[in-house]
Image (cartoon, coloured by chain):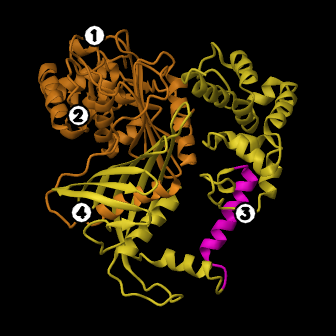
Chain colours: A orange, B yellow
Amino acid sequence: LTLRGLALAAAAALAATLTAPARAGEPPAPAPDGGAPDRFPRAGAAYLVVRDGLVLWARNPEAPLPPASLTKVMTALLAAERGAPETWLTVSPRAARETGARLGLRAGEVIRAGDALAAAVVASANDACLALAEHVGGSVEGFVAAMNRRAAALGLAATHFENPCGHDAPGHRASARDLLALTRAFLAVPALRDLAAREKVEVVTRGGRRMTATTKNSLLGRVRGLTGVKTGTTEAAGRCVIARVEREGSEVVVVLLDAPDRWFTAAALVEAAFREGRRG
Amino acid sequence: MVRFASVAALALLASSLPVPARAAGAPLPPEPGLWWDVTMEMTMRLPNAAAPQSHTSTERECLPKKAPDRPPPRSGECTFQDFRRSGPRVTFKLRCENGVTGEADLLWTADTYSGTTVMRGQGMENRIKLKGKKVGGDCDANEKERREQAEAEGGGEETPEVRNRKQLCAEAAEGGDPAPFLAAEPGGAAECKDATRFCAALETRRGLAQLRQSGLEDAPQQAGALCKKDVAAIERRLCAALAKEPEKKVTADAEASEFLFGSCPDLAKGMARRACAGRSFTGMPFAQREFCTRWAQEALQGR
């Protein structure tokens, strides 16, 4: 098999595809990403590395796994699509009791929906996340139902949500491939794209109390070209991260689930993807 | 390789277009075209190779607006067979005189296409994933070939292609990139003819690091044969010299690190254990984090 053979095959493919007449209403061609090799078997329980839309390497990309706070990518997307950021919301006792990462909200405090969204995305704050879900969905249960409807609309077949903020729960699952598709939808919203890259935001309650929400993403400011997007950790999910990096017009996205050393692993996958690009 | 394939694609397309015959030496007429972003991901499995080699590239190509409704029945030593079209899907097979066979399975819309071609034979397999997106904008689909024709005929002043190739060869020599100096297949022709600077770079860490990064399985052997040098001996000498340098200096120097991981794996392991093991991502200086990230790439692959 020679270079000439290679070129011929590619040429034939191009020749054939270019013959297509315009056809209205045809579905877009699926990304040719099947069968990507697992080059980094020690990276984590599941991962996907995508450069410029092509999946370079993957491990268990379809496996439904606990996504921890990567769940908030959906929460933020729904809130951005449905909510008005300038409206005020009142923190419920249930939201104020939320565990894990917190902004420190108190029951009865009033904050802007946009600030709750920012704290949920930047600092993964569960109290802000739940308050936002109650505000946007009318109730936690109503919001979760909306999350699952949105997941179905996005074609996320391996995804099911049981809560808005990513707590471990039976049936609360997402695959790396679904999380990639979800992240694409998230990043298509300019306001969310901006939040995903921020290291901190300041939240001021209507009563004037100031709080600072600081990012949990240790890659920010440490990996050149990193533009976010989200981290997550629970006992069942392990350490998870979705990272997007842009360099010289090229984009790499890494989705990494249950990775014991997620920061070094994510950084290594990003660098490997760009090195692979230089070889191409 | 990708450029070659794209050029071949253009040539194939051009050859199958119903353009009037032209006299030898006459310049190609302009061919109305549109710009496409073409991404090709090639995975090559070679005999006796432990792992397949992958190359991916995206290039903007000017492709003809008008094209034949199917591949030509024959191109060079190969014939196209079993051409089928069903809605957005096209499949066909390829059979070559040297025993190589292939198949293509493609999907398209008016503005995009994607699919896979596979070629097998002589113990090897080559899989090419294709993705194209029309970006639009008028262009001359024959311009590139016309310039190359002018270059081949040696007429006129230096074309942009010739200038680009000279620059590519100079940069490759400077960086120790072996690909343009080494034939990609037995009996093939290397792209750059003057290997003097490339061979000189083989005596440097940078040149050897580039050689190891090239993705060419037997690059050290090929480069050694081309330059009449014992690459393994040079690596041993430079690794020994590196071992005498302070580790902090080595791990903070990106060029030294790249050479270390490519050419001195045992030395790299020892240094990485001392510099990285048990250290947190956030708690180390930038240069050392880069070194440990590079080490993580090796460790994640079980090296």
In the picture of the structure, the residue carrying the numbered disc 2 is A79
The type of residue carrying mark 1 is Arg
In the picture of the structure, the residue carrying the numbered disc 3 is B193
In the picture of the structure, the residue carrying the numbered disc 4 is B110
The residue drawn where x is 34% and y is 46% is A190
Residue B137 location, x and y as percent? Answer: 36, 72
Can you tell which of label 4 and label 1 is closer to the viewer?
4
> Which of these two is toward me, B237 or B9?
B9
Residue A233 location, x and y as percent? Answer: 39, 16
Q: Subunit of mark 2?
A: A
Q: Secondary structure at mark 2?
A: helix
The type of residue carrying mark 4 is Ala
Residue B235 location, x and y as percent? Answer: 80, 34
* Earlier sequence position, callout 1 versus callout 2: 2
Q: Subunit of mark 1?
A: A
- Whole-angstrom CA distance, mark 1 to mark 2, is 21 Å
The answer to whether residue B104 is seen in the rendering is yes
Disc marking residue A97: 1
Q: Are marks 4 and 1 on the same chain?
A: no
Which region shows up in magenta?
Answer: B157-177
Q: Secondary structure at mark 4?
A: loop
Residue B8 sits above or below residue A2 on the image: below
- Whole-angstrom CA distance, mark 3 to mark 4, is 42 Å
The answer to whether residue A231 is seen in the rendering is no
